[in-house]
Structures are given as structure tokens and as C-alpha cells.
Image (cartoon, helix red, strand yellow):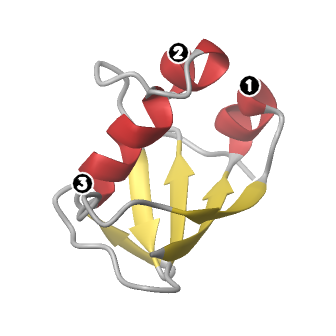
Amino acid sequence: MKLQLRFFASLRESLGVSQESIDIPETIKTIADLRIYLVERGNSWAEVLAQGKVLRCALNQHMVEASTALQEGAEVAFFPPVTGG
């Protein structure tokens, strides 16, 4: 499945990337699964997206829960809990 990932605020700064196109395995079904998959990259990914960290997520520009199912071609965005303008 192909997805477009976007990272905002401190996440973007820590990861050094604001967006990425990614092709994920079929076993990744939800945003929570995707987060675990990204953590497995290690280094800053493991630190920034660790399960104990509070993050907000959006699917196609709508705020959603981590249990939300992914969709082919979707945009998935990750935000820290408070994002200033």
C-alpha cells in the first residue's frame, strides 16, 4: 500500500523530514501499525514515535484515532500534542 506521510512541528525537526512517500507491507492495517513499523527504523524514528509518546494523527486531513484503518494512497500526518502557529 502506498501512503504519503507528513510530519509537523517538533516531529519534523527531530526526524529531519517533513514528508515522505512510502510503500508499506500488507500487514500494516492501522495508523497504530504504521507507527510501530516506523519505530522499527530505529534511531530518531524510535525515539520520536515511541509508544509512550503522545502524538496526534490525521488521515486525509481529518483527526483520527490510532486504530483507524489505512487506505491506499492516503495522507497520514503526525503531530505533537500541541502545535503552535
> In the rendered image, which quarter is residue 51 located in?
top left
The picture places residue 54, in percent across and down from the top left corner, at 35, 31
Q: Note whether residue 28 is visible.
A: yes
- The residue carrying mark 2 is 47
Out of 24 and 76, give the one closest to the viewer: 24
Q: What residue type is labelled 1?
A: Ser
Are the two marked residues, 2 and 1, in contact with CB atoms closer than 8 angstroms? yes
Tell me the CA gap for discs 2 and 3: 18 Å
The residue under label 1 is: 14
Q: Name the residue under label 3.
A: 66
43 horizontally vs 81: left or right? right
Of mark 2 and mark 1, the one earlier in the sequence is 1
Query: Is 24 located above or below residue 62 in the figure?
Result: above
Residue at the image point whose x is 37% and y is 51% from the top? 34
> How many residues crowd around disc 2 within 10 Å: few (fewer than 14), some, or many (20 or more)?
some
Q: Kindly identify the amino acid type of the residue bearing the numbered disc 2.
A: Glu
